[in-house]
């Protein structure tokens, strides 16, 4: 089996797995089946709506399923050694250890006009120097594909922090509900803007349909242009109105490269 076949099989398996996760985390009415923390006195402490707390508990909630999934498709999982390492999960094929896939778990919530933003990893050192092992589990160029396993949810504004006895478990309103899971190749859902102002992180699309359909800015241009753009992000410059400015948009970058013929391949946002 060649690398392209490994990649296709892995993507299809991961997508099928993601479709089943909603049943694992939800009650019959779509609420999160996790209600809070329990102590030895059978008191349940409901969860804060803080997105970092929710994200971490969601990861813990689905992790046993991920381990089982990896075993079923013949992969070992290596966890990121440190908190700031990329990726969250490295899948290594048991029969051919040169076949590796990077999977990041990304959780975010719906807003009135889309979703809250999340990032797709750094465009810094390990992204640029792809044979180096700085802040990454394995050198970037050893991965056959880079994927995002995304979890989108709705925050329940009526939930409150409280302490409830286990006998009243069913009366607790879950802090989140209405899950959507998706799997996407990272470059296919990327935008041409940074995901955060202070760090070198790649931004993503902010529409659920764009994410599910892998309709990112580069989806029609191809992975080569995604790589070249983000390797040069903020360092390449061009003249605009007689002034030298940093290039921070794909349209300007294509003009800078003399490829105005590709401007019509920039995917439109929903």
Image (cartoon, grey):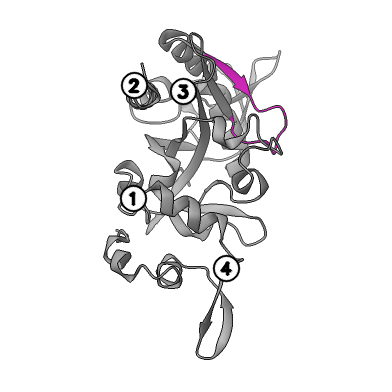
Distance of label 2 from label 4 (alpha carbons) = 37 Å
> In the rendered view, would you say 216 is above or below 27?
below
Left-right relation of 29 to 167: left
Quadrant of the rendered image containing residue 232: bottom right
- Residue visible at 36% across and 49% down in the picture: 222
Q: Earlier in the sequence, mark 2 or mark 4?
A: 2
- Residue visible at 56% across and 30% down in the picture: 142
Is label 3 or label 2 in front? 2
Q: Earlier in the sequence, mark 1 or mark 4?
A: 1
**Which residue is labeled 4 in the image?**
236
**Which residue is labeled 3 in the image?**
170
Pointer 2: residues within 10 angstroms few (<14), some, or many (20+)? few
Distance of label 3 from label 2 (alpha carbons) = 40 Å
Q: Earlier in the sequence, mark 1 or mark 2?
A: 2
Overall secondary structure of the magenta stretch? loop
Q: Earlier in the sequence, mark 3 or mark 2?
A: 2
Pointer 3: residues within 10 angstroms few (<14), some, or many (20+)? few
Q: Which residue is at the front of the view, 145 or 23?
A: 145
**Which residue is labeled 1 in the image?**
219
Distance of label 3 from label 4 (alpha carbons) = 57 Å
Q: Which range of residues does the magenta coloring cover?
A: 76-88
Q: Earlier in the sequence, mark 3 or mark 4?
A: 3
Do we see residue 50 in this rendering?
Answer: no
Q: Earlier in the sequence, mark 1 or mark 3?
A: 3
Residue 202: image location, x then y, percent: 54, 52
Q: Secondary structure at mark 4?
A: loop
* Magenta stretch: includes residue 84: yes
């Amino acid at each position: 089996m060649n690398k392209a076949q490994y990649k296709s099989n892995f993507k299809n398996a991961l997508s099928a797995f993601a479709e089943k996760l909603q049943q694992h985390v939800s009650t019959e009415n779509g609420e999160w089946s996790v209600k809070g923390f329990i102590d030895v006195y059978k008191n349940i402490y409901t969860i804060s709506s803080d997105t970092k707390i929710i994200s971490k508990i969601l990861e813990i909630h689905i992790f046993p399923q991920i381990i089982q999934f990896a075993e079923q498709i013949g992969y070992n999982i290596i966890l990121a050694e440190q908190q700031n390492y990329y990726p969250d999960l490295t899948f290594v094929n048991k029969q051919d250890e040169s076949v590796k896939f990077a999977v990041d778990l990304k959780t975010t919530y719906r807003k009135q006009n889309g979703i809250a933003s999340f990032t797709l990893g750094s465009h810094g050192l390990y992204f640029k120097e792809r044979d180096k092992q700085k802040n990454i589990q394995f050198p970037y160029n050893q991965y056959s594909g880079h994927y995002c396993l995304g979890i989108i949810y709705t925050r329940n504004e009526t939930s409150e922090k409280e302490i409830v006895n286990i006998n009243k478990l069913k009366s607790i309103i879950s802090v989140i509900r209405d899950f959507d899971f998706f799997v996407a190749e990272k470059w296919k859902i990327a935008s041409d803007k940074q995901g955060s102002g202070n760090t070198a992180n790649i931004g993503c699309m902010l529409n659920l349909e764009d994410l599910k359909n892998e309709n990112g800015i580069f989806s029609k241009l191809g992975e080569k242009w995604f790589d070249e753009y983000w390797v040069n992000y903020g360092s390449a410059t061009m003249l605009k109105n007689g002034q030298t400015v940093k290039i921070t948009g794909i349209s300007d970058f294509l003009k800078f490269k003399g490829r105005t013929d590709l401007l019509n391949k920039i995917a439109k946002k929903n």
